[in-house]
Image (cartoon, rainbow, N blue to C red):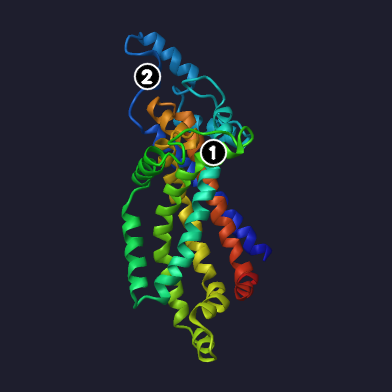
C-alpha cells in the first residue's frame, strides 16, 4: 500500500511539473507585447525597454520559468502586471465562488445522472428508457451558457423567482447567497448531468448482465432492489472514475457560467486577465485549476480500494 501511494504521489508531482511547463510555454507564446499593452502605442523604445526590465520579461525564458515556479512553490503567485497587486490576493476572494459553483454543480449532476441512468438501463426497451436517453442526448447538445440564458429568461425575467446575476457572500446574507447560486448551479449541473447519464447507463448495463444480478432476480428481487443492493456498489468504481474525470469539464463550464451570471469567481478573473494580457495572473489561475483537477483525480484513484476491497490485493503487490 505504501509503495502504491508513493508511486501515485510521484505521478502527481510529475504531472504537475509537466503542466507548469506547458502553461508557461503556451502563455509565453501568446502574441503581443505586455509593455506596449500597458504603456500604449505612444511609448518610446526606452520606456518600453524599461517596462520590460521592470516586469522581468526581458530575461531568458528559462530564468523567467525558474523564478515563476520557485515563487509558486513558496506560495508566491507573483504580482499582477496590470493592477500591481499580488496575484494571490486577487485569487483568494474568488476561490470560494468557483468552489461553491463547481461543487454544487457536480453534486447536482451526480444526483440527476445516477437515478436517470438507472432508468435508462433498466427500462432500455421501454418508452421511459428511450425518453431518458433522448433527453440526455438533447442535454449534451446544449452548451452551459445557453442553458444559463434560458434559465434567466424563464426564472429571472419572466417568473422573477431568482436574481439574474450577481453574487452575495455567504457570511453577509445566506438566503441571498443561495438564491444567487440556484440558476448558475442548475445551468451547470443539468448539462453535466446529461453527459453523465450516458456513462451511468453503460455502467449499469454491465451490471445487468452479471451472474449475481441474475441470481438476485431469480430469488424474487425486483430489478430496482437488485440494482440498489448489488449493482450500485459494483458499478461504483466506474461511476467514481467518470465523475472524477468530469471535474475538468465542470471547472471549464463554471468559467463560462460565471460570465453569464456575472459571478466574481476564478473564471471571471481568468477572462479579464487574458483580455488585459496579464499573463502572470493567467498562469496563477490556470495552475491552481490544474492543481485542483490533479488532486481530485489522485483522490479518486486512491478511493478505488475503499469502494472495492478486491482491489487491495493488487495495490499491495
Q: Position of residue 81 (x, y in %)?
A: 48, 22
Q: Position of residue 211 (x, y in %)?
A: 50, 87
State the residue at coordinates (52%, 19%): 84
Q: Quadrant of the N terminus?
A: bottom right
Residue extending farthest bottom: 218
Q: Residues within 10 Å of mark 1 (few under 14, many from 20)?
A: many
Residue extending farthest front: 159
Q: Is residue 17 visible?
A: no
Q: Position of residue 202 (x, y in %)?
A: 41, 71
In the picture shown, does residue 176 fall above or below 103?
A: above
Between disc 1 and disc 2, whose residue precedes?
A: 2
* Residue that numbered label 2 is attached to: 37
Residue extending farthest right: 2
The foreground one among 165 and 232 is 165
Q: Quadrant of the C terminus?
A: bottom right
> Mark 1 and mark 2: span between their CA atoms?
29 Å
State the residue at coordinates (47%, 35%): 263
In the picture shown, does residue 179 fall above or below 9?
A: above
Q: Is residue 230 left or right of residue 203?
A: right
* Residue that numbered label 1 is attached to: 97
Amino acid at each position: 500500500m505504501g509503495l502504491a501511494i508513493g508511486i501515485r504521489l510521484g505521478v502527481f508531482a510529475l504531472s504537475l511539473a509537466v503542466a507548469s511547463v506547458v502553461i508557461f510555454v503556451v502563455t509565453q507564446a501568446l502574441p503581443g507585447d505586455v509593455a506596449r499593452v500597458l504603456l500604449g502605442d505612444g511609448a518610446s523604445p526606452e520606456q518600453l525597454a524599461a517596462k520590460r526590465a521592470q516586469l522581468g520579461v526581458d530575461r531568458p525564458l528559462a530564468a523567467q520559468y525558474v523564478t515563476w515556479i520557485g515563487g509558486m512553490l513558496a506560495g508566491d503567485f507573483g504580482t499582477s502586471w496590470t493592477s500591481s497587486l499580488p496575484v494571490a490576493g486577487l485569487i483568494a476572494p474568488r476561490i470560494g465562488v468557483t468552489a461553491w459553483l463547481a461543487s454544487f454543480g457536480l453534486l447536482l449532476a451526480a444526483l440527476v445522472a445516477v437515478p436517470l441512468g438507472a432508468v435508462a438501463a433498466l427500462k432500455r426497451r421501454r418508452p421511459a428508457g428511450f425518453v431518458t436517453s433522448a433527453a440526455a442526448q438533447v442535454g449534451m447538445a446544449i452548451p452551459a451558457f445557453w442553458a444559463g440564458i434560458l434559465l434567466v429568461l424563464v426564472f429571472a425575467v419572466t417568473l422573477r423567482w431568482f436574481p439574474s446575476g450577481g453574487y452575495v457572500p455567504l457570511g453577509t446574507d445566506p438566503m441571498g447567497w443561495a438564491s444567487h447560486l440556484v440558476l448558475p448551479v442548475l445551468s451547470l449541473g443539468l448539462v453535466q448531468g446529461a453527459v453523465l447519464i450516458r456513462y451511468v447507463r453503460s455502467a449499469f448495463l454491465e451490471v445487468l448482465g452479471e451472474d449475481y444480478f441474475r441470481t438476485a432476480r431469480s430469488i424474487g428481487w425486483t430489478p430496482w432492489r437488485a440494482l440498489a443492493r448489488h449493482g450500485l456498489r459494483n458499478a461504483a468504481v466506474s461511476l467514481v472514475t467518470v465523475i472524477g474525470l468530469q471535474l475538468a469539464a465542470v471547472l471549464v463550464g463554471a468559467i463560462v457560467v460565471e460570465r453569464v451570471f456575472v459571478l466574481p469567481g476564478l473564471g471571471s478573473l481568468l477572462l479579464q486577465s487574458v483580455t488585459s494580457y496579464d499573463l502572470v495572473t493567467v498562469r496563477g489561475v490556470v495552475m491552481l485549476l490544474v492543481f485542483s483537477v490533479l488532486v481530485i483525480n489522485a483522490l479518486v484513484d486512491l478511493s478505488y480500494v475503499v469502494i472495492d476491497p478486491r482491489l487491495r490485493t493488487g495495490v499491495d503487490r
